[in-house]
Each structure stands twice: as C-alpha cells, then as structure tokens.
Image: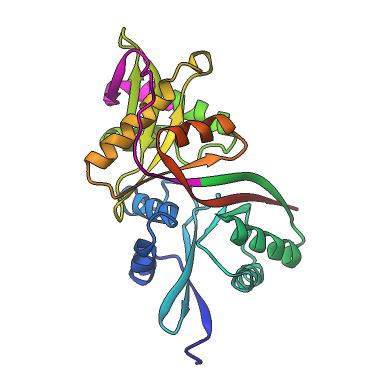
Amino acid sequence: MDTDTAEWRLTPDLDDFLTRAGDFLRSRPALHTVPLTVTETLRTRGPHVYGDGAPEFGVLERGGAVRATFFRTPPHQLNLTSLTAEEARTLAARLAELGRPLPGVSADRDTAAAFAEAWQRHTGATAVLRQRQRLYRLGTLTPPRPIPPGGPRVAVEPDRELLVRWHLEFADAVGTGTVRDAGEWADARIEHGGITFWEDPDGMPVAMAGTTPQVAGQVRVASVYTPPHLRGRGYAGAATAEVSRAALTAGAKEVLLFTDLANPTSNGLYQRIGYRPVADFAVYDFSR
C-alpha cells in the first residue's frame, strides 16, 4: 500500500479509536474539544449515554499518522474534525456506500459545508444549514460589572429536580433537543461539580452555567441558562464568569465555549468577559 495514501479506518470500539487517535485529538484540544469531551463521557458513563445506538468512530491515516477523525453517537449527527474538501467527499462516498443513515453533520464551517454537499450528491438527501456557531477561548477573564446581587453556589443532589427541568428548558430554547437523558446529565454534573447556580440574595437560583470535565487541559463552558422571566439582569454573565474562574483555578489551560452566531446578545456577553474567537463551525440537517 502506498504510504502516502490516506485511508479511513472505521471501528465501533472506543478503546481502539482512542489508541489510534488520542494523541491527535490532544494535540489541538481547543479545536477538538467536542470529540475529547464526548469520548471521555462515553468512557466514563458507558456507550449508551447519548442514545441506544452503538457509537461509531473513524480515523483517517496517512503514512502511519492520523490526519482526521469522526465520531457519531446514534441517533445524533456525525461530528468531524477538520478535513479538506477532497477528504470530506471521500468520507461521504464511503459512508453512503455502507448505507449509513445520517441525520446531519457538525464540523468546522468549511468541512461541514463540503461534507454536506457531497452527502447530498451521493444520497439525494437535502442538506439544510441549521446553525452557525463560533468557538471561543478565554483570554483575560473580566467579570461583568456591576455584579448582580447574590452569589454563586455549586449544584448538589437536592438540586437535581431543578437541574433536570432547566436542562430540558435550555435544550428547548436553543432548538437542538436533548442529546442525553436529562436525569443522567444532572447526575453526571452533580457528581463532578459541573453546574454552578447564581443565587439571588434570598438563596433562590436565578441562572446556571456548567462546565465539562477537564480533558487534555481543556474545559468547555456549557448549558448557560436563565429562565425567561429573569433575563436581562446579568445573572448568566456572572455565572459564566464564576465557572470560568473556577476552571482556571482547577488548572485548566484552555476554557472554551460555543455560541450560536444568530444570538448577538450571548456573543457580546462572552466577549465582554474575556472570550476571544477561535473558529467558526456549522451544523447541517439531512432529510430525504
């Protein structure tokens, strides 16, 4: 075999995938934050944490070196690391030949667009851009001023019911649906101290911000949510600044987050507290 030829290796085995691709994923922890955190969740919480289907993984190798990866946790969309347009077309053709049904793709903007176009050509599916995202990395943390009244508190077991409810409301608000069972998500966040509330002076939670467990030195802020009737008072910004500070204190080298580019309020907020753009991503939905 020509050692310069790129070849996709598909596997259902997480350990095999991480053995082949772990160093590659850790080499660019910011850009690879999603596969790093998802595979860590699969490793620690089990293969069906995101759904009943068996996870699928792929590694693109050239000359013995890993060039790119993908994963999918059915029934959710395919997630890709950066590919050239030709690599995206080759993968789309390979998966189409195997008859793998795909509901969509998530990747950096150019990779996602190239794969979506190729998938549409090979399968006849319609590809629709669902969301444009921006990945941010924390620079110098600048807590919002003025800080709203109240203070932070890490969520604990008695907060489980509230976490479940807010997680479902958050998923509905961002329009992506839940990718994990809400109860399991709450249990995992409580277990590693991964949700912080902002409480008002009476001790009532008024917003939450979460973080993923630290993997390869990176932590991602996720599930920032304020109930609609409490918005516009600075609670989300204060909670986000607090979990960002806590992540740095715990030793994270990079603190990251994704935003929906259609939401100028959240993009402005995160930049004001010190987050800086890294790359743009896109999510496409496929339908017949």
Q: Looking at the image, which residue sits at the far left? A: 250
Identity of the residue drawn at 64% across and 67% down: 92
Q: Magenta span covers which residues?
A: 135-164
Q: Is residue 274 magenta?
A: no
Identity of the residue drawn at 59% across and 70% down: 84
Q: Looking at the image, which residue sits at the far bottom? A: 1
Q: Is residue 280 left or right of residue 55?
A: right
Identity of the residue drawn at 49% across and 19% down: 227
Question: Image quadrant of residue 16?
Answer: bottom left
Question: Image quadrant of residue 152?
Answer: top left
Q: Is residue 137 magenta?
A: yes
Number of numbered labels in the structure image: 0
Provide residue 212's location: percent of width, then percent of height.
35, 42
The answer, for residue 58, to whether it is visible in the render is no
Question: Image quadrant of residue 209?
Answer: top left
Query: Viewer-proximal residue, 280 or 78?
Result: 280
Q: Is residue 270 above or below residue 10?
A: above
Q: Is residue 186 above or below residue 119?
A: above
Query: Viewer-proximal residue, 128 or 49?
Result: 128
The answer, for residue 77, to whether it is visible in the render is yes
Provide residue 151's location: percent of width, then percent of height.
30, 18
Q: Looking at the image, which residue sits at the far top? A: 202
Provide residue 181's location: percent of width, then percent of height.
45, 37
Q: Is residue 116 above or below residue 144?
A: below
Provide residue 81's location: percent of width, then percent of height.
50, 62
Q: Is residue 287 above or below residue 264?
A: below
Looking at the image, what colour scheme do you see?
A: rainbow
Q: Is residue 285 left or right of residue 5?
A: right
